Amino acid sequence: MDRRLITMLGLVVLGLIGLFIFTQNKTTAPTLASNAKASNHVKGKVDSKVKLLIYSDFQCSACYRFYPIESQVINKYIDKISVQFRHFPIESSHPNARAASRAAEAAGLQGKFFEMHNELFDNYSSWTNSNNPLSVFTELAKKMGLDVKRFKTDFASESVNNTISADKKAGEDAGIDGTPTYFLNNKKLDNGDIATVEQFSAVIEKAIEKSK
């Protein structure tokens, strides 16, 4: 075979290999949209000087165990502190975590983020190991009186996914590597110090007193 023809065939093969690698990289490693913004789910006394920031993974068993403690403390101080939630799905070990975050975000677009947040934890066992968690989330959306068609559209949207990714990136930038993670006035709390309602309350009380 002519040497020039062999060379040309070689270049074509190399080009095809390069194109394949480029395409694979684009498929498996999507980048976060440059205009993606972190979520802004805040409740309580929003102008309080005491601000509790929570990074959570809905499928995380530790988050599930902390949920009743967290809920009681938040309800106890809801008129005194600001509480903000952010997503931190750890998909390597929690395959349904991002889907659950999508459900919460989709509900949030209809003004019911925290209601879905609570439903997801209250119904943890019904979806956490499901092969079709969306079916469970859809039933929860119906139960909450959401527009189900809009819920499904928002659930699948790129903007909802980007918000979750922006939350997670913010958490990673803050040095988070596990959940739940709590920040009180920008100071990371040790979960061992807030493992009971009484302990968590004491930490909140101290912050309230300090803010006066």
Image (cartoon, helix red, strand yellow):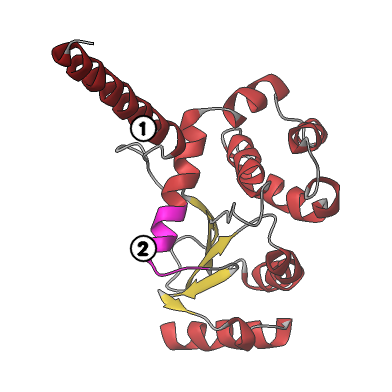
Residue 174 included in the magenta stretch of the image:
yes
Q: Which residues are magenta?
A: 168-177
Q: Which of the labelled discs sits on residue 173, or is there none?
A: 2
Q: Are marks 2 and 1 in contact (CB under 8 Å)?
A: no
The answer to whether 127 appears left or right of 207 in the picture is: right
The answer to whether 148 appears left or right of 42 in the picture is: right
Dominant SS of magenta comes to helix
Q: Residue at x 62, y 44 (%)?
A: 113
Residue 150, image x and y in percent?
63, 22
- Pick the front one: 189 or 112: 189
Kind of residue sitting beneath label 2:
Asp
- Helix, strand or loop at label 2? It is helix
Residue at mark 2 to residue at mark 1: CA–CA distance: 29 Å
* Crowd rating for badge 2 (residues with CA inside 10 Å; few <14, some 14–19, many 20+): few
Look at mark 1 in the image and give the residue it sits on: 21
Q: Quadrant of the C terminus?
A: bottom left
The answer to whether 170 appears left or right of 101 in the picture is: left
- Pick the front one: 23 or 167: 23
Q: Is residue 59 visible?
A: yes
Q: Is residue 20 above or below residue 176?
A: above
Residue 68 included in the magenta stretch of the image:
no
Q: Residue at x 48, y 30 (%)?
A: 158
- Helix, strand or loop at label 1? It is helix
Going by the picture, which residue comes out furthest to the front? 1
Q: Quadrant of the N terminus?
A: top left
Where on the picture, by quarter, is residue 178?
Answer: bottom right
Total labels: the figure holds 2
